[in-house]
Image (tube, rainbow, N blue to C red):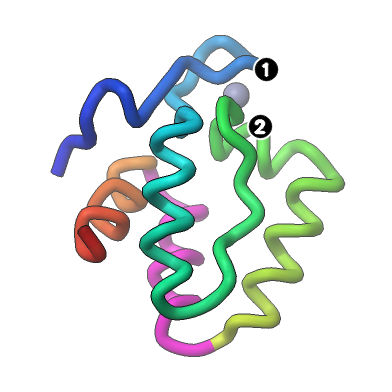
Amino acid sequence: MEGKETDYVICTRCGRHRAHSEVGIRKLRDAFDLHVAAPPIPPGVCWTCIREDPALNSALGAWLTRYSGKLVRPIREAIARPLEIIDDFVAHFQ
Ligand SMILES: [Zn+2]
């Protein structure tokens, strides 16, 4: 499922990939807050850049470790696979 354009911006770091905007991040956090703490994903930074940033990657890794369970598998898949997976995952909670 495709998200709304306002949910995304071009990554402010690499300028190549799609990243969640402030609005998109808020929606993501709202979705996660129903269950567990939201993942530490900054707005305007794509998944590729998050993985390549030691601090962000570490924070996300810690989050994944902490919230093992039903949410971990879809999140791991989201990180390992294209951004569309995240869209589907977020849409699932909307
Ligand atoms: Zn990027």
Q: Quadrant of the N terminus?
A: top left
Residues at marks 1 and 2 touching, judged by CB atoms closer than 8 Å = yes
Mark 2: secondary structure: helix
Mark 1 lies within 8 Å of ligand 1 (Cβ measured): yes
Q: Is 44 placed left or right of 54 in the picture?
A: left
Q: Residue at x 66, y 32 (%)?
A: 49
**Quick check: 15 above or below 76?**
above
Q: Quadrant of the C terminus?
A: bottom left
**Quick check: 37 above or below 44?**
below
x and y percentages locating residue 8 in the rendered image: 38, 26
Q: Residue at x 68, y 79 (%)?
A: 65
Displayed-image quarter of ligand 1: top right
**Splitting the image into 4 quarters, where does residue 14 fall?**
top right
Residue interval drawn in magenta: 69-82
Are there few (<14), some (14-19), or many (20+) residues within 10 Å of tag 2?
some
**In the rendered structure, which disc, 1 or 2, sits on the residue that comes first in sequence?**
1
x and y percentages locating residue 16 in the rendered image: 51, 13
